[in-house]
Image: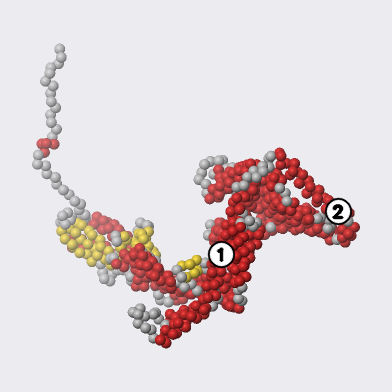
Amino acid sequence: MCLRSLRLIVALFILCAPYVAFLTVLPTAIHAQTSVEELDYDEWNRIASRAEGVLEDRRASNVALEELRAEVVSWRGQFAQAQTTNQTRISTVRDQIAALGPLPEDGSAEVQEIADRRIELDAQLARLEAPRRKADEAFSRANGIISEIDAIVRERQAESLSELGPSPINPANWPAAFRSLTQTGSAILAEVVSAWNSTTQKTELRKNLPATMFYLAIAIVLLGRGRYWMERLTLRVQQREKQSVSGLQGFVISLGQVLVPVIGLFALVEALFSTKLFGFRGQIVLQGLPFIGIAFFGAKWLSMRLFPKYDGRAGLLNLETESRRKLRLFSAILGILVGLSVLLARMAGFEYYSPATHAVLAFPLLAITGLLLFRGGLILMRSPVVRGSASGDAVPLDLRGRIARAMGQAMIAIGVVGPLLAAIGYFVAANSFVFPAVNSLALIGLLLVLHGVIRDLYAFLSGAGDEGAKDALIPVLISFAFMVCSTPVFALIWGARTTDLTELWTRFGEGISLGDARISPSDFLTFAIVFAIGFALTRLLQGVLRSTVLPKTKMEPGARTAVVSGVGYVGIFLASVIAISAAGIDLSSLAIVAGALSVGIGFGLQNIVSNFVSGIILLIERPISEGDWIEVGGQMGYVRDISVRSTRIETFDRTDVIVPNADLVSGTVTNFTRGNLIGRAIVPVGVAYGTDTRKVVAVLQEIAEAHPLVALNPPPSVHFIGFGADSMDFQIRAILRDVNFSLSVKTEMNHEIARRFSEEGIEIPFAQRDVWLRNPEVLQPKPATRNRKGPSS
């Protein structure tokens, strides 16, 4: 364990050293830059006035607004840097003013020398703060302009989604759409024919012919057989016995199913480009081919990981072979449709297609996408993890089943609603959530695949094995971190602008205010790293003490536990203090709030604090130890564990009783085995009246001395206690070498007493009672009454 902790500390140090150095140099660099460079506020005021005029006019296009926003963002970054100007010097002057003390409150005059010095420092502070105040004002103005631009752009996006356009199923829009598509195709062909007939182009083609043939040969090989080769190699690796290793190797090799054919597609595009036969429109098509290939081969790879081709690997949803085949086919087609939709949008922008033409040409892609989503959703809804079992029996769904059912329902809804909206005329709205839904499904599938890879990697590095990795927490946390990091990608898929995300990151980078203190993400990250290093060092020291140092001392196990626990608490406290200091977090302004909160916590947690302090007292004074036989509060048993809050006692019924430590410190505790195991056993015996008492004493004395666990120094004793109602009472009082066996000793003595008394003719009496009845005649039965009527005549 110590070695693992040492490795963790070294790794943390290696990872954090560049970051700490960066944090150390960055403030100095920013200060040097802002102190040397002077901002041109006149230029800024001109740009800001122009931006405010554009916003009032509200006629600028979204592209113009985005360009204006980028310019304002650049200025805002400079103002943010200027806000740290003279920061160190301002802090020093403020400390100097505070050192002069407060102004006299009784109206009396201050010492002239101190008053002059205070006036001088106030003037110096105002002069130092002037650049910062000017930067603060400009920063606020820039923030306002950026917020207004974002509001206008978002408003226009919302209006476009609710705008009713031409219907693609209206036959009146079809001729113009087909005519535009034909013209585009004819223009591409005309560009190729014109280049072919050009002497200059033919010369260029002959010059580049070797390179063209080379690229074409690579494309034919990689596109024709590359993906098949990588698929067979992946299958061969995954058939190995150790699942985690084969899973990792299979994942890495399976990436070649995307990379190899995409490289071939790039080679094909390069071969076509080298011919110099394509014009602007042809180049748009050629530039779109790699994207279509990435979408197609990426979809096929992802579908192979989620819906395996071979029966030995049923995948996440335990689907049948035919269902998996359909989903793989649907995924590949969806990849092509997504690529074609992007290519069509670029071509429509270049050719300036009308909204009706674009809607008519894109509607088949959108309708086929909706159909595939609908059918895929039905397959997911029929999967065993959603139905509960292969037979369809109704059983509660687990998390995987609920997610699969939600995804299936969403796919069915989008597959129906999307084409309907487009058919009505809301093409922008339909196009804005049908294809983003496909991309979101692909990203969710990628996250599921990455979770499996992370689990296999953890099983390989930790040696926990495949089953241990499935129940481990670390892979789940890493997967959750990936899911959180994918949130911006989901936002971009669903129409968020990159500027929106950068603006959120800027706001996040400014930190949060707690009183007069501002905590930024860099401060928090510094705190987390320093605290993690301190925590790791504390655990390392605890491990060394527990396994190496303390076992060589004469301390009791309980005292060792107390030392290790104390070192842990002190180490965590010091790590927290050092981390706060390293992060530069000033919490002095929160002293009053922290004090009030401490009082409230003190009243609410006084019992917990009392038990905590009592636990420390128990660990230090050691009135009880683990393994002691104690009785407290009517509970008797062995002490199994002493923590800082409570103590666990195992009773003789093998049940655990949790006793608060305050009860052990303030209450009455009987410890039967503290210091040693010697204890006394008392065995009561009763004999009948008339028995020779001296004989009874002699027999009992022999029985007590003959038992192997009874100590002979001091010797056991037999006492004639008194005359009872039914017997003469005796007691055997013996000191046992191990009081833990007192019950078994009493049992064996009673057996021996019964045997010896039977041999010696000594009677063990039992209670007898005589019952006297004052009127016994009441208990006698009454005579039967005779029937006075005679027999009937």
Q: Name which residue lies at 64% across and 57% down.
A: 60
In the rendered structure, the answer to whether residue 6 lies left or right of residue 362 reads: left
Q: Nearer the viewer, residue 18 or 545?
A: 18
In the picture, the quarter occupied by the C terminus is: top left
Taking the image as shown, residue 565 lies to the left or right of residue 634, namely right
**Quick check: can you spot residue 751?**
yes
- Whichever of labels 1 and 2 marks the residue nearer the N terminus, that label is 1
**Seen in the image, is 576 located left or right of residue 302?**
left
Q: Which residue is mark 1?
A: 143
Q: Position of residue 155 (x, y in %)?
A: 58, 53
Task: Please name the amino acid that badge 2 sits on.
Answer: Ser
Residue 379 visible in rendering: no
Q: Which mark is residue 194?
A: 2
Residue 326's place in the image compared with 484, above or below, is above
Outermost residue to the top: 793
Q: Is residue 541 above or below residue 654?
A: below
Give the amino acid at mark 1: Asn
Please identify the quarter of the rendering in which residue 567 is found.
Answer: bottom left
- Front residue of 448 and 553: 448
User: Residue at horizontal 43%, vertical 73%?
Assistant: 588
In the rendered image, the vertical position of residue 465 relative to residue 675, given as above or below:
above
Depth order, front residue of 783/363: 363
